[in-house]
Image: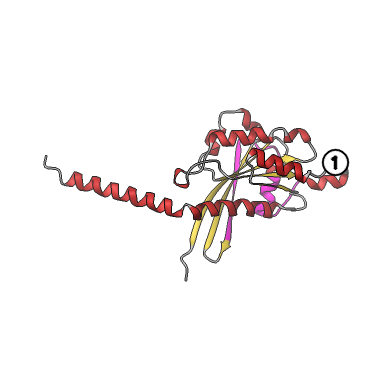
Amino acid sequence: MAEMREYLYKILVVGDLGTGKTSIIRRYVHNIFSSNYKSTIGVDFALKVIQWGPDIIVRLQLWDIAGQERFGNMTRVYYKEALGAIVVYDITRPQTFEGVTKWKKDIDTKVALPEAWGGGQIPVILLANKTDLIADGHGQHANPTELDQFCKENGFLQWFETSAKDNNNIEEATRHLISSILKLEEENADNVANEDDTLHLNTNNQQQQHNGGCC
């Protein structure tokens, strides 16, 4: 029987005020929806435990960063040790799309993958949220060609149209992000092991030198 492996991943959920970040998290974690959530102040977070496979458990910490936080200095603290991010905009309010590149740039400049994984940018997906409002005559669906190009130019892993109300594509988007992080984890497992062995060896050498001193 394979040994059970558990991973803890911190995921940032960011975007301008009112884009539906909290609704997405509540739908994903608790499978509930309300149109009456108050705006997040500062940061909030939720935990979801996923049986990813027969021998893999993933524990997700979803950090809900308030829309106005990009203008403050605390995001560097909030972003610390994150391994992935979700940037959300409201598909019915084009002005919220303007904030997407600013959030992505903020993430890229303040957080990076672990050195044992080679560093670099953390995986980020883009959500075009509130598609349920399109049927009511608000906004229009994203242009796939344009968003594909936008994601390619700005370093996004992938984009998804989502609706927290209809529970559309939220599970699929999150699984895509987790898969990319797990892939990085597996690709760099040997590097982490070698780093741990080196640290252990150095610690033993220091201890032997200390114990073998003549003075």
The secondary structure type at the circle numbered 1 is loop
List the residue tagged with mark 1: 138
Q: Residue 102, position in %: x, y?
A: 65, 32
Q: Residue at x 58, y 36 (%)?
A: 107
Residue kind at label 1, given as amino acid type: His
Q: Is residue 84 left or right of residue 19?
A: left
Q: Relative to residue 61, is residue 205 drawn left or right?
A: left
Q: Position of residue 134 (x, y in %)?
A: 84, 45
* Mark 1 neighbour density, 10 Å: few (under 14) some (14–19) many (20 or more): some
Q: Which segment did they paint magenta?
A: 22-51
Left or right: residue 13 versus residue 187 is: right
Query: Is residue 23 a member of the stretch shown in magenta?
Result: yes
Q: Per the image, is 104 magenta?
A: no
Residue 206 image offset from top left, x and y in percent: 24, 45
Q: Is residue 203 visible?
A: yes
Q: Residue at x 87, y 45 (%)?
A: 136
Specify the quadrant that holds the C terminus.
Answer: top left
**Between residues 105 and 13, which one lies in front from this camera angle?**
105
Q: Is residue 37 visible?
A: no
Taking the image as shown, residue 8 lies to the left or right of residue 136, namely left
Query: Image point 50% across, 53% down: which residue?
Result: 185
Q: Residue furthest right?
A: 137
